[in-house]
Image (cartoon, rainbow, N blue to C red):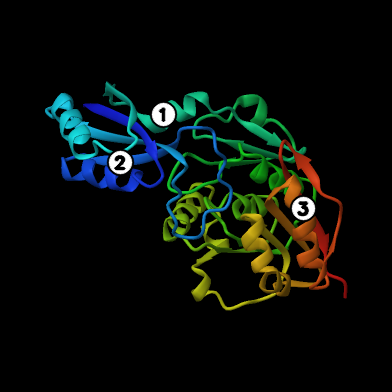
Amino acid sequence: MAWHQLSITTDNNTATEISDFFSELGAVSVTYMDAEDQPVYEPAPGETKIWHRTKVIALFELDAEPELVKTLLFSHFKDSTITHWHQEVLQDQAWERTWMDHYQPMKFGDSLWVCATGQQSTDQEHEANTVYLTLDPGLAFGTGTHPTTALCLEWLASHDLTDKIVIDYGCGSGILAIAALLLGAKQAHAIDIDPQALEATHYNAEKNQVQDKITCYLPEQFSPIQADIVLANILAKPLCELSASISDLVKPQGELVLSGILNTQAKSVISAYQAHNMQLAPPVSQQDWCRLNGIKPT
């Protein structure tokens, strides 16, 4: 099936109104994109971020009339800042297959491969003492391609996780909790504010045959425990706000791994956790992002 894709650029004050107008005209979906390469790192939970210059993109069924939509739009918003009208016919694709065609298996440390379904090679299968995490695109963030996730996977692949209890705070796709289990952890507790993330984590745990070792929670469902390893790959602001709660989850002599932190934000995150008796090593960086890890003294 094909679709009409219609897009305009406008300001942040008008984007939501235009989105609603597209919906009223019968759009089957409306999305926002940054029109000026303005980075967004920390939207609040539940917030839809609108950039100063935002591209609003609407999909209509093929029997819609793009020129009529354009006429109605510019008539209704004649005093607004609409620019860059664009229309095209978008052919339907098997989007997950397209993603997998561009996704290459990734190796972390000496012991962990992350692959899409069907990508595990014969050479990989013959590597001794190596585990393979299968992960496909789905409902939640986290495939290992982003530096924040890669930094955590590198840490996991370089440590002995045998019989450890792990907490993955902000689990997303569940990739970190699942990797920890495949690398020898005994049990994982996965926590996220997004029910879709928990659904994705359940799905990926089953795909990797570790579903009996992982439990998923919304934050309000989780009764705090102390774990050998606590992973929190979220963002600097919530990491600081939750520093007391996350630090309390680490058992004495347990280890803490924090990511989702820009290099420029590392000092503030370190200060927040030092205030709760966490001893953190110097940041480990990849591109603009860094990982912090350390231990809780006895």
In the rendered image of this protein, does residue 78 appear above or below residue 263? above
Q: CA distance from mark 3 to mark 2?
A: 36 Å
Does the image show residue 254? Answer: no
Mark 1 crowdedness (10 Å alpha carbons): few <14, some 14-19, many ≥20: few
- SS at circle 2: strand
Count of numbered badges drawn on the protein: 3
- SS at circle 3: helix
User: Which mark is drawn over residue 97?
Assistant: 1
User: Quick one: which residue is furthest to the bottom in this view?
Assistant: 223
In the rendered image of this protein, does residue 287 appear above or below residue 238? above
Q: CA distance from mark 3 to mark 1?
A: 37 Å
**Quadrant of the frame with the N terminus:** top left
**Quadrant of the frame with the C terminus:** bottom right
The spot of residue 216 in percent (x, y) is 51, 64
Q: Residue at x 49, y 63 (%)?
A: 193
Mark 3 crowdedness (10 Å alpha carbons): few <14, some 14-19, many ≥20: many
The spot of residue 26 in percent (x, y) is 16, 40
Left or right: residue 209 versus residue 67 is: right
Q: Nearer the viewer, residue 241 or 280?
A: 241
In primary-sequence order, the first of circles 3 and 1 is 1
Nearer mark to the viewer, of 3 and 1: 3
The amino acid marked with disc number 2 is: Val
The amino acid marked with disc number 3 is: Ala
User: Which mark is drawn over residue 266?
Assistant: 3
Q: Nearer the viewer, residue 133 or 53?
A: 53
Image quadrant where residue 165 sits: bottom right
The amino acid marked with disc number 1 is: Arg
Left or right: residue 18 versus residue 95 is: left
Q: Nearer the viewer, residue 29 or 37?
A: 37
Q: Which residue is mark 2?
A: 30
